[in-house]
């Protein structure tokens, strides 16, 4: 079951929701929940207009893929998306991720498959503009003809990859999807992780509570030092083909980390879980 929610930070916020062409025109396939209750006419394929107040929640869910749905707002809003009722060996699971606005999408990414499943991960890419050329390490380049189109590829474990796009795209990493695991079972439940483009990597020292710093993956543009209580932590360093970037992982998954020091830019991910560090304050993409 696919879903997304929108919540504004100001009163009298007008939302226009445009559903992608992939969604059925049958209203029976789409459920809209609004908290608190607000009356609105919903017509799939045409903009649905809602007026919400601060921290109201507009929630949609469907058995069909809602990727490519466009939300246009006259004030700032938060958008989160995901899936629920995902069958796994350990029961029913769900996944969720916050989605950045289109001006924060990018054109150059480093993709690091999780070490938690040898079958690899799914990279999901959504286009912002028509005729977007996408290149991924190990794949032939391809053109996505329409905006709002979602494209998926499976990236094998250990295949650290560059993703380049001629126009801004959104990139998401889906970890632990048993659909693609013919030879092994993932060691974690399904999760979806936002992959920041290189322009939104952060700089300088990162300090976070220890409990968040297990199974760390660092994607970096230069060498760095990972510390645990002032002690340098042993790491594995992997070069990303056709780039100067590195993927740095901990040799011991039980190691806890409290500080990262580097002179270059980097993104920080808890392996198979969530994005820990990026910089969304600058570098807006403009078509």
Image (cartoon, rainbow, N blue to C red):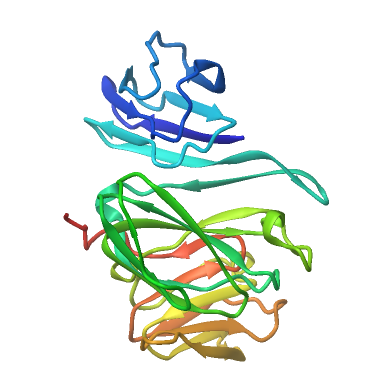
**What is the residue that sits farthest to the right in this orientation?**
90
Q: Quadrant of the C terminus?
A: bottom left
Measuring 41% from the left and 47% from the top, which residue is drawn there? 99
**What is the residue that sits farthest to the left in this orientation?**
287
Q: Classify 175 as above or below 87.
A: below
- Residue 110: x %, y % from top left: 42, 73
- Residue 228: x %, y % from top left: 59, 82
* Residue 253 as seen in the image, left or right of residue 76: right
- Residue 236: x %, y % from top left: 59, 90
Measuring 45% from the left and 26% from the top, which residue is drawn there? 57
* Residue 129 as seen in the image, left or right of residue 78: left
Q: Tell which of 22 and 194 is nearer to you.
A: 22
Q: Classify 233 as above or below 267.
A: below
Q: Tell which of 136 and 40 is nearer to you.
A: 136
Q: Classify 64 as above or below 138.
A: above
Q: Tell which of 271 and 185 is nearer to you.
A: 185
Q: Tell which of 210 and 49 is nearer to you.
A: 49
């Amino acid at each position: 079951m696919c879903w997304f929610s929108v919540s504004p930070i100001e009163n009298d916020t007008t939302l226009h929701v445009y559903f992608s062409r992939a969604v059925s025109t049958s209203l029976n396939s789409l459920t809209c929940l609004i908290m608190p209750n607000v009356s609105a006419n919903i017509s799939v394929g045409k903009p649905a207009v809602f007026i919400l107040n601060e921290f109201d929640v507009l929630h949609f869910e469907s058995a069909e893929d809602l990727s490519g749905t466009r939300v246009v707002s006259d004030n700032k809003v938060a958008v989160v998306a995901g899936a629920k009722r995902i069958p796994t060996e350990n029961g029913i699971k769900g996944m969720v991720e916050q989605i950045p606005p289109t001006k924060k999408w990018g054109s150059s990414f480093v993709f690091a498959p999780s070490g938690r499943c040898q079958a690899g991960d799914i990279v999901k890419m959504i286009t912002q503009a028509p005729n977007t050329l996408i290149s991924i390490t190990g794949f032939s380049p391809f053109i996505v003809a329409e905006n709002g189109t979602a494209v998926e590829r499976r990236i094998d474990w250990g295949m650290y990859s560059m993703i380049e796009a001629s126009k801004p795209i959104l990139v998401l990493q889906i970890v632990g999807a048993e659909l693609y695991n013919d030879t092994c079972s993932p060691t974690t439940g399904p999760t979806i992780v936002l992959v920041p483009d290189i322009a939104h990597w952060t700089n300088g020292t990162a300090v976070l509570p220890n409990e968040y710093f297990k199974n760390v993956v660092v994607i970096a543009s230069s060498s760095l030092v990972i510390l645990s209580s002032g002690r340098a932590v042993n790491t594995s360093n992997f070069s990303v083909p056709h780039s100067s970037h590195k993927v740095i992982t901990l040799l011991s998954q039980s190691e806890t980390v409290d500080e990262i020091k580097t002179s270059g830019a980097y993104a920080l991910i808890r392996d198979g879980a969530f994005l820990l560090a990026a910089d969304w304050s600058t570098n807006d993409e403009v078509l």
